[in-house]
Amino acid sequence: MHRQDLEAARARAAAAYNAAADLFDHPANTFWDRFGQATIDRLNLRPGQTVLDVCCGSGASALPAAAAVGAKGRVIGVDLAENLLELARTKARQRGLAQAEFQLGDMMSLAFPAEVFDAVVCVFGIFFAPDMPGAVKELWRRVRPGGKLALTTWGPNFFEPANSVFWKAIRIEAPELHKSFNPWDRISDPASLAAMLREGGIETYQIAEEAGIHPIASPEDWWITLLGSGYRGTIDQLDAESLARVREANLRFIAESRLNGIEANVIYVVAEKPA
């Protein structure tokens, strides 16, 4: 991908998640915190350690990491969306986690030296890199010998069955915005994930699949989940009339099917760099 295309992709991602920040931490979107905490739990962090969290969002994994490493540790969260970083900073202050700091940045141009972090974390972010093995190399290079890299990605059937309904409505209203392929589909099974890791220079790793359901308490909750996630980038490109019809199609599906949960299957990776 040419540099100009990369810059455009970064700008689109930043715009989508800056817009989504207004509902990112809504109670309907508890999956961010749930899977962020679960990722950190797999690292067995110790007081005093240093952690880099890339694509940190509003701190779903960075803040649990900061609690784990304690006041003598250090956590640096990096994200493209300044609005999400502000949410993370606010929560860190509220929780007394002065050891957590948050910086605007991109995973493909990290301004950190090699082998300085006890752990590097990327939750629901690695698939946004056009060159995923290259991104893995960048993250792995920052892990010190004996340290760990943790990646978490979506498994199969992401947010189904509601996900398909959303994209069907988009295809009807704005075919040019329809995505037949989501970025996380590239690594939504252990085999493709393992191939990416090996291409990124990681030979030894643990992969764990976890099946899950994210509850949908009401039709409106599903719409809030869409607005408080990367889907916001698509939704915000609709004109007012198309937006109203897409919203209605989604709310109607949830109501008529009496859907009370969507698939939220995840895959965890933990790799330890040889000492």
Image: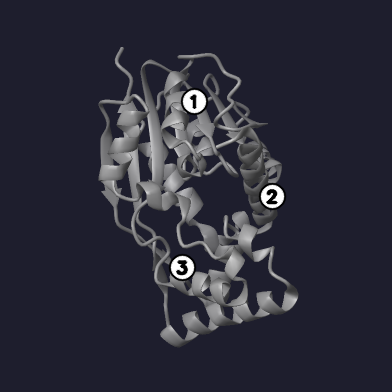
Q: Residue at x 52, y 71 (%)?
A: 166
How many residues crowd around disc 3 within 10 Å: few (fewer than 14), some, or many (20 or more)?
some
Residue 112 is left or right of residue 202, and the answer is right
Mark nearer the viewer, 2 or 1: 2
Q: Residue at x 35, y 56 (%)?
A: 265
Q: Quadrant of the C terminus?
A: top left
Image height of 254 relative to 53, above or below: below
Residue 241 is left or right of residue 216, and the answer is right
Q: Which comes sooner in the sequence, label 3 or label 1?
A: 1
Residue 193 is left or right of residue 240, and the answer is left
Colouring of the image: one colour
Determine which residue is flagged by label 3.
163
Element assignment for label 3 = helix
Give yes or no for contact between labels 2 and 1 (Cβ–Cβ under 8 Å): no
Label annotation for residue 15 = 2
Label annotation for residue 51 = 1
Q: In which quarter of the image is the N terminus?
A: top right
